[in-house]
Image: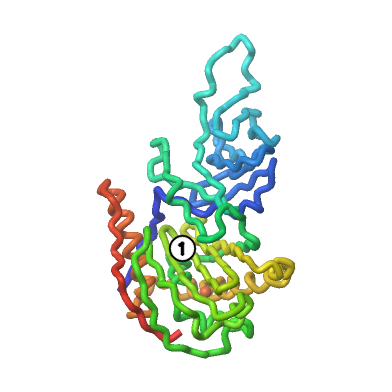
Amino acid sequence: MTENKNFFLRNLWYYALPGGQLKPGATIAKNLLSEPVLLGRTLTGQPFALRDICPHRGIPLSCGGFDGQEIECCYHGWRFDSTGRCTVIPSLLESQDFDFSRFRVKQYPVREVQGNIWIYMAADDKADASPSDIDIPMVPYFGDQAYQLAETVKLPCFVDHAVVGLVDPAHSAFVHRAWWWRSPRSLYEEVKQFDPSPYGFTMRRHKILNVPKAYLLVGGVPETEISFRLPSVRIEHVSTDRHTLCNLTTVTPISETETEIHFVAYWTMPWLTPLKPFLRPVVRGFLNQDRQVLLKQQMGLKYNPSLMLIKDADTQARWYYQLKAEFARSLSEKRPFVNPVKEQVLRWRG
Ligand code: FES
Ligand SMILES: [Fe+2]
């Protein structure tokens, strides 16, 4: 079965970046879904996002400056506040009095939740986007707490290949070999119950039988629940009687050929926090293993081969494509989204 429709889903919150990367008074220019976006944080701590193009002559606003409150374009010095409203046009005489506040840069809705900055990518440029905050993905258990660890890696592929990698249980034993995770080629038979969940599906809570060594750190026999939701968010919730560890992994399209993967983790084990400097390279190494294999995949995808999705190991990938197609259809038909996933048991060796 071939699934190769390269389009981005709209009207959803996408992960923009871990909040810690955006310091007060700083800006970061990024491409998101092939759009130039200028992310910034005011000196008072508010994150914001504007289209990174000056409405006057089209120069990127990121070429200009930011004083912690307003952006100044480098070409003619027009100034814009963090909502995108034009506040100053230096070339105007005081007598040339007209209302330039209607000159606006497009503003994107952004929210900072649990340390993560999300951006709403609307389908319609002109419509005033009023997204619902309810749909912003959150890890369970940790309330308002921010993540303790964040890592970002760029992947050289279209977003769908990265998502399929995220929900693919069959590659770990081959791609993620490491002493702290799995021994080489140790394949276990897995039987997992899946349920539909908001905009996605969830692997039902269960005891981890073949505990990867890294999870022994949580203490005791851990239970886990893993959920996936559109557009591309995976949340894993591992817990024992004593402790909880959650991670949120998202992939955000940069362009049709590039995607960013963000991994953030939350935990309750106090002794793990000082070990962060050691944890960081481990997480990076893990993400880089995915990056390396996706790079190799690109060598083959150049020839536009038809691809296969097999039962049951690829069922989650198949669900992703079904969820994506249904979401796009529900938008264009202006009707509620109907989750195509049905309760199911999947079996694979992985
Ligand atoms: S191009 Fe930005 S002020 Fe002229
Ligand atoms: Fe992977």
User: Is 73 above or below relative to 35?
Assistant: above
Whether residue 249 appears in this view of the structure is: yes
**Residue drawn 52% across and 54% down?**
15
Q: Measured from the top left, where is residue 237 in percent x and y?
A: 51, 68
> Within the image, what quadrant is residue 44 found in?
top right
For label 1, count other residues whose C-alpha is less than 10 Å away and answer few (under 14), some (14-19) or many (20+).
many
Under mark 1, the amino acid is Phe
> Within the image, what quadrant is residue 24 found in?
top right
Q: Secondary structure at mark 1?
A: loop
Q: Measured from the top left, where is residue 9 in percent x and y?
A: 39, 54
Which residue is the site of mark 1? 158
- Seen as rendered, the residue at the extreme top is 95
- 40 sits to left or right of 309: right
Q: Measured from the top left, where is residue 345 in percent x and y?
A: 33, 78
- 152 sits to left or right of 332: right
> Within the image, what quadrant is residue 195 found in?
bottom left
* Residue 246 or residue 230, whichever sits in front: 246
User: Is 29 above or below relative to 292?
Assistant: above
* Residue 276 or residue 7, whichever sits in front: 276
